[in-house]
Amino acid sequence: MKTRGHEIFVALRPTNEWQARLDFVPPENILHVSLRNSLGVLSAQKIAEFIVENNIEIVHAHAARDYIPASLACRIAKTPKFVLTRHVLFPLKSFHRFALSNLSKAIAVSSAVEANLQKIFPKDKIALVSNGIDVEIWANANREMLRKEFRFKHNISFDIFVIGTIGELKILKGHKDFILAAQIITQKFPEARFVIVGRDNSFKQTLRRDLKNLVEASGLEDRFLWLEWVEETASFFSALDVFVSASHSESFGLAILEAMASGTAIVATETEGTKELFSENTGKIVSVKNPLKLAEAAIEFLEDKHSRKIYGENARKTARGNFTLEEMIAKTEKLYYSVLSVNKNKY
């Protein structure tokens, strides 16, 4: 948005981990504010003062816990328009219909999220803007070089199959199913290696321990690589022969989209997010909570290099054609102009 000529302001928590990524925003345009509960009245007051001081026209909230404080800040400041984005499938509460009555637009990142929002807000207040990524990062990447770099760094042979998944460690992400599928895959390909990338965001943060215990009980501990974080995912996806998304529920699936952009063969469960992303021959879709089907689909790819290449290229084309960052930004900008009821040419 800044490169399109707009002035950007950011409100974030003092403990936020991502401020370093906002180095393009002047320090005076950043407000540090703590939201201690779902109402956040004091924080809303601070945000409202910041809005008035800087003549901010649009307030855009992304996390559910921020919706009400953002809405309240707009009411206090009186002039700005309030926009929210819903990134998940979990339904909003019925009271949000009244608590967020000053909403100008609710953005849904997928058709499934859009359907859920329609249960709370009028249809004319809802807009579908799919997530987008900078697909050129993957298009311009040297896949073979990145593949070798990742494998060398993590002591993985260049000539064995690697199957991986990425995403926060939560029950809904289906990591247990991924491990059970790995047990079946290793019966066919004993040398195969598996990579799980993700921070443990489970309740009490015990899921990683439980998953590792399951791997150990299977006798596969030397076949698994565990990583909490990968800064540049292009190298991770390039290192894989097959990417697996075993999620039980997915509103969109950014990890799947990145795998698509990288040209990686994909096996994914039949979630709403997968159906939003996949077209014919984009990847293999299997039923949710079915490790056997996950394994069978992955094995089909591992046995057929040509199939992996064809599906990978189809996935890359779909990502480049339908889910670019540029398209997402353009649609969001257009929505901003619409809620302000102004013509773009006035700016």
Image (tube, rainbow, N blue to C red):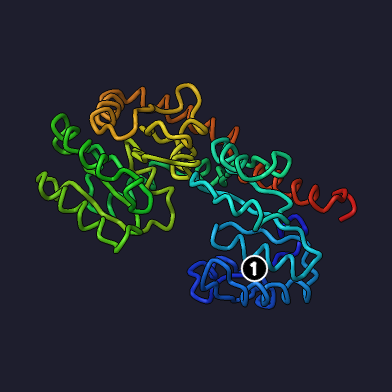
Query: Which residue is at the far right?
Result: 346
Compared across the picture, whether 230 is left or right of 205 comes to right
Instruction: Establish if 120 lies above or below 10.
Output: above
Instruction: Establish if 342 lies above or below 189.
Output: below
Q: Residue at x 49, y 74 (%)?
A: 15
Instruction: Establish if 23 lies above or below 280.
Output: below
Residue 103 visible in the picture: yes
Q: Which residue is mark 1?
A: 10
Q: Residue at x 55, y 57 (%)?
A: 64
Compared across the picture, whether 151 is left or right of 142 comes to left
Q: Which percent across, then down, holds residue 130?
A: 60, 41
In front of the other: 149 or 300 = 300
Q: Which percent across, then down, holds residue 309?
A: 39, 27
The type of residue carrying mark 1 is Val
Location of the C terminus by quadrant is bottom right
| SS for dot 1 | strand
In front of the other: 134 or 52 = 52
Residue 324 visible in the picture: no
Q: Quadrant of residue 84?
A: bottom right
Q: Which percent across, then down, holds residue 102?
A: 73, 56
Q: Quadrant of residue 270?
A: top left
Q: Residue at x 82, y 53 (%)?
A: 340
Compared across the picture, whether 173 is left or right of 44 comes to left
Q: Residue at x 15, y 53 (%)?
A: 213
Q: Which percent across, then down, holds residue 222?
A: 14, 50
